[in-house]
Image: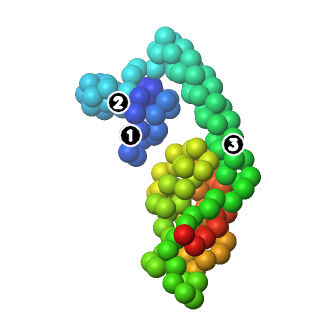
Amino acid sequence: MEIILIQDVDNLGSAHEKVSVRNGYARNYLIPRKLAVEANPSNLKQLEERMKQLQKKEAKLMAEVNKVIEVLKASPVKIGAKTGTSGKIFGSVTSVQLARAIRDQKGYEIDRRRIHILDEVKELGTYKAKVDFGNSNEAEVEFEVTAE
């Protein structure tokens, strides 16, 4: 039986995919649990329309991500840290502080879990971090640690 998956199903396929399964598996498990629908002409037409909408949404999202990447690359972000007399900072700069600085200075809210600082930040200076936006979109952000 030909079906269209509504949700991802392990060992079968991902959402919005047309697959062939045994009749009993489709009728007794997938369709009653709203994991799939039968692949009839009207459902296939709905699938095409849904895919067009997803592509439009994806294109709009990609444009927004590219805009954010350009803003992040434009100028370095400044982070203030408490320092000792030798120029070493107390503690270290973390992705939480970098996310807060990006929000305050650039105006974009970025989840701290998407920020990966490349080096340990224990002294004043300029460092780099990578921001992962998903779908293989990454931006390298330069940030400067200054004394408060």
Residue at x 35% of width, y 30% of height: 35
- Quadrant containing the N terminus in the rendered view: top left
Cα–Cα gap, marks 3 and 2: 34 Å
* Of the pair 29 and 68, the residue shown nearer to us: 68
The residue where tag 3 is placed is: 66
Residue 114 appears at what percent x and percent y?
A: 51, 55
Q: Which residue is mark 1?
A: 9
Q: Earlier in the sequence, mark 3 or mark 1?
A: 1
Q: Is residue 88 visible?
A: yes
The disc labelled 2 sits on which kind of residue? Leu
Q: Position of residue 106 (x, y in %)?
A: 62, 48
For the residues labelled 3 and 1, the Cα–Cα distance comes to 32 Å
Within the image, what quadrant is residue 38 found in? top left
Q: Position of residue 148 (x, y in %)?
A: 54, 69
Viewed as shown, does residue 33 lie left or right of 45?
left
| Crowd rating for badge 2 (residues with CA inside 10 Å; few <14, some 14–19, many 20+) | some
Q: What element does badge 2 sit on?
A: loop
Residue displayed at 62% across by 62% down: 78
Please name the residue shown 55% across and 87% down the image.
Answer: 85
Q: Nearer the viewer, mark 3 or mark 2?
A: 3
Mark 3 closeness class: few <14, some 14–19, many ≥20 residues within 10 Å: some
Describe residue 121's horizontal placement relative to residue 139 as left or right: left
Q: Which mark is residue 35?
A: 2
